[in-house]
Amino acid sequence: MELNPNQIRLMMLQVADAIIAAEAMLSQADRDLGDGDHGLGMKRGMEAVKAQLEPMDPASVEQVFVTTGTAMMSSMGGASGALFGTVYRAGGKALAGRPAFDSEGLALLLEAALEGVMKRGGAKPGDKTMIDALAPAAAKAREVTALPLPDALKAVAEAAEAGKDASKAMIAQFGRAKTLGEACIGFPDAGALSVTIMLATMRDFAAA
Ligand code: ADP
Ligand code: MG
């Protein structure tokens, strides 16, 4: 199974709606560890994504993901705008020349997203950031490229969720949560929660 550029556009519109619907949950997660603005920032980013994707007649899957990243980067501001923008811009560029999105494309997208975010933000796995959901998701995606896309997305969403849950035990090394030290144990990272919601929505789209 492959998704064509227009299906990827519809998938990303569904991702945008899921993140907007999760605004309160994402802000609460950030409030437990940071400043509480993550849900609002992501909502602003996803509204900008919708404005770009709703009228779009996409020529490629690359274009849909890169446009998503650019819209997030230019509307959210701050560190997380640049970082989530990089997820989709770097991930999308890795799909250049691929006519459709399949399990191999999923692995390429997540590997390039992870590499881009690590380069841009300097965090590593274990630092209690979105990387703790993204890294296990990318590793799982590479493992399951032989599976049909819906099954690959199911495994990848599960890996992201497990990574998000594992972030509860971590002590933050970046952002405001860093000042909390051991007080951040028990709470998952807000950005990792966003990554988990995004991948779960992609899984549901591909399964439908
Ligand atoms: P801000 O930190 O500006 O308040 P948000 O609250 O929107 O921005 O986003 C916070 C999220 O950004 C964190 O939960 C974390 O997942 C992610 N993040 C912060 N710094 C980094 C980094 N250096 N690398 C990767 N992700 C990061
Ligand atoms: Mg914040």
Image (cartoon, rainbow, N blue to C red):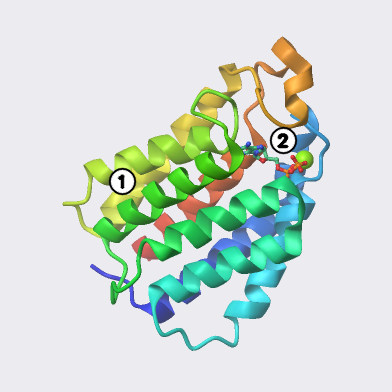
Is residue 4 toward the left or the right of residue 23 in the image? left
Which residue is disc 1 drawn over? 141
Q: Amino acid at mark 1?
A: Ala
Whichever of labels 2 and 1 marks the residue nearer the N terminus, that label is 2
Res 159 visible? no
Q: Alpha-carbon neighbours of circle 1 within 10 Å: few (<14), some, or many (≥20)? A: many
* Ligand 1 positioned in quadrant: top right
Q: Is residue 168 above or below residue 35?
A: above
**Residue drawn 57% across and 32% down?**
123
**Residue drawn 62% across and 41% down?**
191
Q: Position of residue 8 (x, y in %)?
A: 43, 72
**Residue drawn 45% across and 44% down?**
114
Q: Position of residue 192 (x, y in %)?
A: 57, 38
Mark 2 lies on a secondary structure that is helix
Is residue 169 toward the left or the right of residue 162 in the image? right
Disc 2 Cβ-to-ligand 1 distance below 8 Å? yes
- The CA span between labels 2 and 1 is 26 Å
Res 168 visible? yes
> 127 or 208, which is in the foreground?
127
Q: Which mark is residue 29?
A: 2
Is residue 9 toward the left or the right of residue 159 in the image? right
Q: Position of residue 170 (x, y in %)?
A: 58, 18
Is residue 115 toward the left or the right of residue 195 in the image? left
Q: Amino acid at mark 2?
A: Ala
Furthest residue to the top? 182
Q: Specify the quadrant of the image occupied by residue 142.
A: top left
